């Protein structure tokens, strides 16, 4: 049996450009019936989420966990990690695609220096399940900065 | 310039198992400071989201848009599409990974039969940006069923 199955649902009505989806995070019920539209994806979010923002959210939360675990295994557990993930949606050939994922982490981590933090940040990126789900298809960039603790 | 950049952020405090992240969808502000934990990822969601649920949400919303567009280009626009995406989190080697993504779509689409719906559903999956972001790394399964309209 797998560790976990997690389900989300979108009910879409109408055309791509004029229609609207309602998104529900079914497993957690944290979001129920939130609107998603093509305009919120490609123009201004205007208080609506989008596939790329959700992918960025998956990446940011996954990487924060991966780095927390990697730092603890190095006997330098973090006090605080602040991870921002930005997914870039762009034209690819005749259609659209996720062109890039930029990860920026700032960490307050006692007992480590900038070089050591960067090294573990890179290792954690390699182990992160969401990074590995998009690797080779989406360019992943990582910037890691140690904050004074 | 890219079509769109979408950012999400996780601030993590404490260890992987006992700590907690706060997730914010920065571009849309739809979710601000929602808790994410390792337990909600690997055990019961208990009202908290997880990287895999967010990936499933990206996939469900993206695929609904891709299929809506593909059906319209076939001159058979849908009345309603109900897309569920389930991401499976599992042990992979020494670590963890996203092992599978199951897409299940039920469609109310006038003027098309089950075989035609399935064919367009498969084509839309091939064009879906989130599918293409995980393709080759995560096994994608698709089930498409036409509902009576």
Image: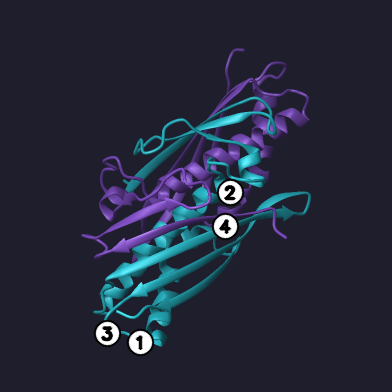
Chain colours: A purple, B cyan
Q: In the rendered structure, are the residues bearing label 1 and label 4 in contact, judged by CB atoms less than 8 Å apart?
A: no
Q: Can you tell which quarter of the image residue A70 is in? A: top right
Q: In the rendered structure, are the residues bearing label 4 and label 3 in contact, judged by CB atoms less than 8 Å apart?
A: no
Give the distance between the C-alpha atoms of the residues marked 2 and 1, in whole angstroms: 36 Å
In the rendered structure, find residue B113 and report the number of the disc placed on it.
1
* In the image, residue B124 above or below residue A41: below
Q: In the rendered structure, are the residues bearing label 1 and label 3 in contact, judged by CB atoms less than 8 Å apart?
A: no
Q: Nearer the viewer, mark 2 or mark 1?
A: 1
Can residue B90 be seen here? The reply is yes
Q: Does mark 2 fall on the same chain as mark 3?
A: no
* In the image, residue B140 above or below residue B25: below
User: Which chain letter matches label 2?
Assistant: A
Pick the residue in front: B29 or A145: B29
Label 1: few (<14), some (14–19) or many (≥20) C-alpha neighbours in 10 Å: few
User: Which chain letter matches label 4?
Assistant: B
**Identity of the residue drawn at 53% across and 51% down:** A27
**Identity of the residue drawn at 26% across and 47% down:** A43
In the rendered structure, find residue B87 and report the number of the disc placed on it.
4
Residue beneath disc 2 = A130
Q: In the rendered structure, are the residues bearing label 2 and label 1 in contact, judged by CB atoms less than 8 Å apart?
A: no
In the rendered structure, find residue A100 and report the number of the disc placed on it.
none
Residue beneath disc 3 = B111
Pick the residue in front: A116 or A62: A62
* Residue B28 at x, y percent in the picture: 34, 39
Give the distance between the C-alpha atoms of the residues marked 3 and 2, in whole angstroms: 39 Å
* Residue A47 at x, y percent in the picture: 29, 40
């Amino acid at each position: 049996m797998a560790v976990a199955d997690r389900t989300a649902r979108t009910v879409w009505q109408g055309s791509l450009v004029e229609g609207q989806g309602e998104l529900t995070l079914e497993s957690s019920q944290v979001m129920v019936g939130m609107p998603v539209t093509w305009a919120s994806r490609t123009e201004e979010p205007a208080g609506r989420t989008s596939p790329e923002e959700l992918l960025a959210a998956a990446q940011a939360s996954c990487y924060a966990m991966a780095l927390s675990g990697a730092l603890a295994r190095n006997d330098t557990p973090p006090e605080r990690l602040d991870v921002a993930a930005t997914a870039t949606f762009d034209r690819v050939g005749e259609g659209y695609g996720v062109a890039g994922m930029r990860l920026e982490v700032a960490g307050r981590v006692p007992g480590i220096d900038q070089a050591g933090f960067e090294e573990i940040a890179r290792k954690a990126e390699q182990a992160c399940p969401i990074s590995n789900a998009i690797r080779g298809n989406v360019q992943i960039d990582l910037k890691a900065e140690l904050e004074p603790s």
